[in-house]
Amino acid sequence: MKSIVGGFAMNYQNLAKIIIENIGGEENIGSLTHCATRLRFNLKDDQQANEQQLKDTAGVMGVVNKGGQYQVIIGSDVGNVYKEIVKQTNFSESETNNEDDKRSRISKVIDTITGIFTPILPAITAAGMLKAVLSVIVVFNWLSVESQSYQILNFMADSAFYFLPILLAASSAQKFKTNMYLAMMVGGILLHPNFVGMVAAVKEGGGTIALFGLPITAITYSSTVIPIILSVWLMSYVEPIADKISPKAIKFFSKPLITIVVVGMAALIVLGPIGYIISDAISNGIKTLETVSPWIVPMLIGTFTPLFVATGTHYGLVPIGINNRVTAGYDTVIYPGMLASNVSQGAAAIGVGVKSKNAATKQLAFSAGLTALFGITEPALYGVNLRFKTPLYAAMIGGGLGGLFMGISRVRNFSGGSPGLLTLPSYIGDNTLNYFYSACIGAVISIVVTFIVTLVLFKDEVETTTTSEKTEEVMEPTRPLTHQGIEIVSPIKGSLHSLKAVEDGMFSEEILGQGIAIQPEEGKVFSPVNGEVTALFETKHAIGITSDQGVELLIHVGIDTVQLAGEGYEYFVEKGQKIAIGTPLIQFDLEGIAAKGYQTITPFVITNSAEVGDIIVANEGPIEVGSQVIKIIH
């Protein structure tokens, strides 16, 4: 494979071979990892490395021998070179980290829920949307429920919900770091037709189910959430024990055999019933609350969902909504409230677009607002509403009132999906359109109230800037620039510093390119441009972005934080994903990383500086997310 770098064609295979030869050969490599821009070797003998030859090699930007690591600087192509070295040696691409997790228990729980449910959302969303479409088709008599076409489409939609335990088994196994296929097998055990038949027979004719005399509760586990998560969690402890006690000669089959027998029996006899009881208790609690005050929870969800999204805790609400639909057939609290909140976020951003006289702000606000109306709120929330504050307040007011109306109307959501205008048909069910009409009215209330309040509260930045102010050659970080060029905003809240303040020659000497450094005040990184994610790393401490204008950016969170092997970092995006200003990119444990002795100052550089034109950076000082920090003039 080849890449054009600095005017020459980089052959990854040849470059990897040259690097291996000049660090003393494979036998001199103790271990190998890589970060955003460099290969990091632990060499058995540094003296065997030919540093000058490496520096003279086309494709190598520099060599640093620091902190017990021999670092070969490659740049944005480091991932491809690393893979070629792995192919040519006996090193594995996977790396484990056994350091203690310093996060709070609440943070761990939220991270676990997020990690389990986020991967399955595409399947759940697709199933919910298909259900919504079928509801519309039936209401308008375009297709009979007795027809084979309807029945086939219906079981296609039902499949994601019916086999939800298997989907959750796969994502839970990834989160709990256990064998995915054994976990899915446990899901299959809970859903097996023979077991379902036994349960049906007991419920119809009485009797019991037992395994070696141990009673099994007659429960069906289709569409359930908690039982399989508990079972896979147990597997994460059973599998290592099975590995330890299995003789090496028969470990290939004894380890999975012991694991599946122990976990399968525990799932049927203990964990399944416990999970079912927990699910039922949650459902009954919500039903009780709905009976007493049906408007409270939807109103609170409608009001505070933006804050839940900002902190990442909104994923904890998703299982509740799913559980409600599984146990009761519909959800009256989570999804209606989120619908009100999401459309309010969109209306607030659009309100900013209408009132603002700044061209860049208008463009961002309209595009992000439209996206939020359809259920994807992060660009609107981070790029517009949080940035200007008053639109956020307006969205919370409108979302709360919309949620209040839907709570009073006892609106029911029957099939989920990403809450927004596109999923309004998911409120069609129980052979009536009443819930659909009420959901539409609630959405309109949220949109209209939010839009009006935004127009009243929002003060455009342009309005507060006097005409006597003149554009400076050095940017003020809190004031948008208006002359022509490419504007890049801050991805992090904190304080701006010169790259010379970074204790890493690769950045301080601008080897990778010009830019700035930010000392973070909070552990969140947002997109500074509209563009595409072009580089992600296993250690999650850095990200590469290419703007729509072709500017290549690198955000490197902390110095030498590759050593953490991903601990304390979490990506919110995938490689190749299109992003807008304000899209969440990375969340990191700021205090935890600092507590381990790592500097958290974050270099933010343009890696193709030589190609883009003159680069002007902001003055040092406090900076907010979304404020301009770099200006490129052609």
Image: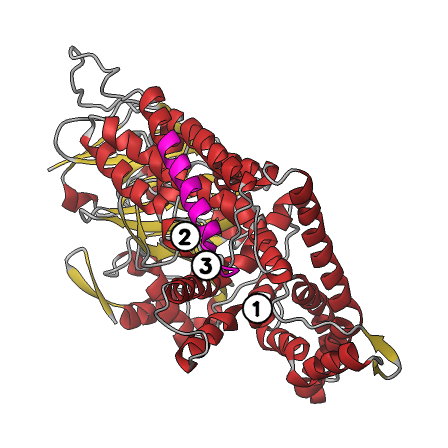
Q: Residue at x 16, y 16 (%)?
A: 470
User: Which is closer to the viewer, label 3 or label 1?
Assistant: 1
**Main secondary-structure element of the magenta-colored stretch:** helix
In the structure shown, which secondary structural element does the residue marked by tag 3 occupy? Answer: loop
Query: Up-down: is 537 above or below 614?
Result: below
In the structure shown, which secondary structural element does the residue marked by tag 1 occupy? Answer: helix
Whole-number angstrom distance, CA of label 2 to CA of label 3: 38 Å
Q: Residue at x 76, y 79 (%)?
A: 204
Q: Residues within 10 Å of mark 3 (few under 14, many from 20)?
A: some
**Residue type (three-letter) at the residue carrying disc 2:** Leu
Q: Is residue 571 visible?
A: no
Q: Tell me the residue that label 1 is attached to.
A: 164
**Residue 219 at x, y = what percent?**
73, 72
Q: Is residue 404 visible?
A: yes
Q: Tell me the residue that label 3 is attached to.
A: 538
Query: Up-down: is 349 above or below 107?
Result: above
